[in-house]
Image (cartoon, rainbow, N blue to C red):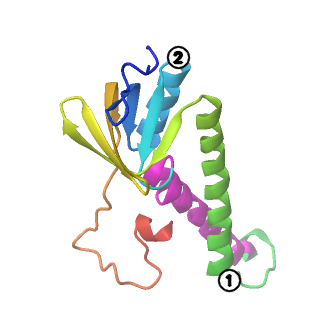
Amino acid sequence: ATPPTAARDAPGGPHTVATLGLGCGEGGDSAAVEASRLWADVTLVEKEYLVGTCLNWGCIPTKTILRSARIALDARNAAEYGLRLDPAQVDIEVLMERKERIVEELRGQIEATARRLKVEVVYGEGRMTGPKTVTVTTAEGETVHEPEAGILATGPVVLKLRANDHALEGAWPSDEAG
C-alpha cells in the first residue's frame, strides 16, 4: 500500500488511505490489526469506543456480572460443602465499578495495540457517500476519505424480545448493563 502523498491529498480534497474501517467492533478491530501487521496504512472510524459492543456493553460486561452472580450463588450454597458463611449479598455499585475497571483496562490495551501498530483511530461517524467515498463527521467537522479498501464492521443493534418484560427490576439488556 502506498502512503498518502501531497499530490493525492490536495488541501480540502479527499484523504486517500489504503484501508479505512467503519466501526471497530471485534471484527473491525481484528481486521484492522491484521491489515496493519501486513503493512497496510489503516484508519479506523469509531463512533464511541474501540471493540464496540462486545467489550464495552455486551460480552465482557455480561461475563463480569455473571461471574459475580456465580460467586454469590456459590456462597449462598456453601453449607452444602460444609462451609458456614453469612448469606452473600450483592453490592450493585461495587459490582458495576469492578465491571467498569475491567472494561477500561481491556479498552486501554486495545488502544495501546492500535497506537503500537500505527492504526489511526478517528472518533466520529462515517457513512458511505459514494462507491469508494466515505464521509466522516467528527466534533471538528467533516472529512472525505477515498480508501483503496474498506472494512465494514458497524456492529449489532440490541434486540429486545417482545415476549420479555424489559421493565423487570434487575433485568438489563446488554446496552444498559455496560
Q: Image point 18% across, 30% down: which residue?
A: 131
The percent coordinates of residue 97 (x first, y second) are 66, 71
In-front residue for pair 58/144: 144
In terms of secondary structure, where does tag 1 sit? loop
Q: In this figure, which residue is indicated by the disc labeled 2?
A: 39
In-front residue for pair 87/174: 174
Taking 57 as reference, is 68 left or right?
Answer: right
Q: In this figure, which residue is indicated by the disc labeled 1?
A: 89
Taking 55 as reference, is 163 left or right?
Answer: left
Q: Is residue 165 magenta?
A: no
Rate crowding at label 1 as few (under 14), some (14 to 19) or many (20 or more) other CA atoms within 10 Å. Answer: few
Task: Tell whether label 1 touches label 2 (CB within 8 Å).
Answer: no
Dividing the picture into quarters, in which one does residue 166 lie?
A: bottom left
Q: Is residue 62 magenta?
A: yes
Vertical placement of residue 157 versus 75, above or below: above
Taking 121 as reference, is 101 left or right?
Answer: right
The percent coordinates of residue 176 (x first, y second) are 44, 71
Q: Image point 46% across, 58% down: which residue?
A: 58
| N-term mark: 2 or 1 | 2
Vertical placement of residue 117 versus 105, above or below: above
Q: Amino acid at mark 2?
A: Trp
Q: Amino acid at mark 1?
A: Gln
